[in-house]
Image (cartoon, rainbow, N blue to C red):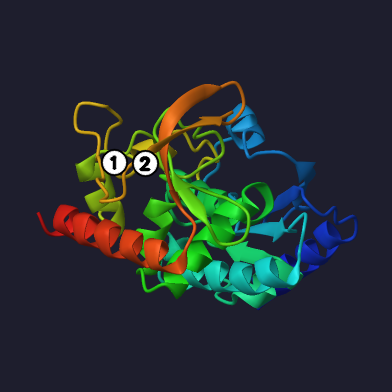
Amino acid sequence: MKHILRTRKALAQLKEERQYGTNSFGLVFRDRPPVLHRGKVCYNILNVEHPSYSGETGPISFISLISPLNPGELLGITAVQFMNWLMRDSPFSHVFYTKSGKRALKEGMVCHTDVPAPMLIGGLSIAREVNECPDKVVLWGELVRLGMKPIHAYVATYYLIRLSGMAFQVKKPPYNTNHLALSYPLTREYIKNFCLGRVVSSGMTNFRECTRFYGVFLLWGKQGAHDRAIFRYSKPPTKIEHSGWGNNSYTSSIITYKTTEERQEFVREFTKQIEEICNG
């Protein structure tokens, strides 16, 4: 009970200077004041400091505020659904003590620390997409609405960008994975392990013992283009200009889906191919 009260108090402190569109988080300890990081862009400070603890002195909980930069009605509804999936049913669900998407977005969330550090930060990286990649979250919601399984829809967002309205495009690498939870290019084995929740990394240290979290991208397998998963679609590609992310400016063949019928066909084709990967 004392641990719960300490965590609630620390979360209240973190909320005092809440900044929308930022990532604030903290470590709560048993016998000393919490360490709070407000308005950070990423979690890398945990790698820079990466102190080691004993089981008795390490953080008893990890707290985080997710504050969407543009909390509009559509994003708000979809973000709650996205967070519910992440915290209840995704391969990262066991790192979250908080299980309500609505509560997580409004009040902040609490995470366990007796879990591998890469798993904790991997799950938190997906939650952070509500801030940093809201179009990705809305796209996920549209795919789920069209009948795709939530976990398949999340993988699909690594291959898609969103246009105006609900229309979206399929794009090819390069893809900037900075601040994301999965490595790119995604291999067939990587996708299968992620969708089945099968962690292949070994020798990971619990966050309570050391906050260093290197290895997030290796949880589900190794990176590599040799076995890159290639999805094929019946609609022919059109040549358009796309600026990419960050410094990844390029021109690529991109397939555009603007009508509901085209999007439904994409869902059917993508679902069939990803199920073949997972069952293979």
| Residue name at image x 55 percent, y 75 percent | 99
Task: Give the residue displayed 75% in from the left and 50% down from the top.
Answer: 24
Which sits in the foreground, 64 or 184?
184
The part of the image, by quadrant, that contains residue 200 is: top left
Q: Which residue is mark 1?
A: 201
Taking 227 as reference, is 103 above or below it? below
Residue 130 appears left or right of 87: right
Residue labelled with disc 2: 204
Asked if residue 97 is positioned above or below residue 10 in the image, the reply reads below
The residue carrying pointer 2 sits among few (fewer than 14), some (14 to 19) or many (20 or more) residues within 10 Å by Cα, namely some
Report x, y in % for residue 237: 36, 40
Q: Position of residue 11 (x, y in %)?
A: 76, 64
Q: Is residue 224 above or below residue 91?
A: above
* Numbered disc 2: secondary structure: loop
Contact between marks 2 and 1 (CB within 8 A): the answer is yes
Task: Name the element at disc 1.
Answer: loop
Residue 31 rendering spot, x and y as whole percentages: 71, 57
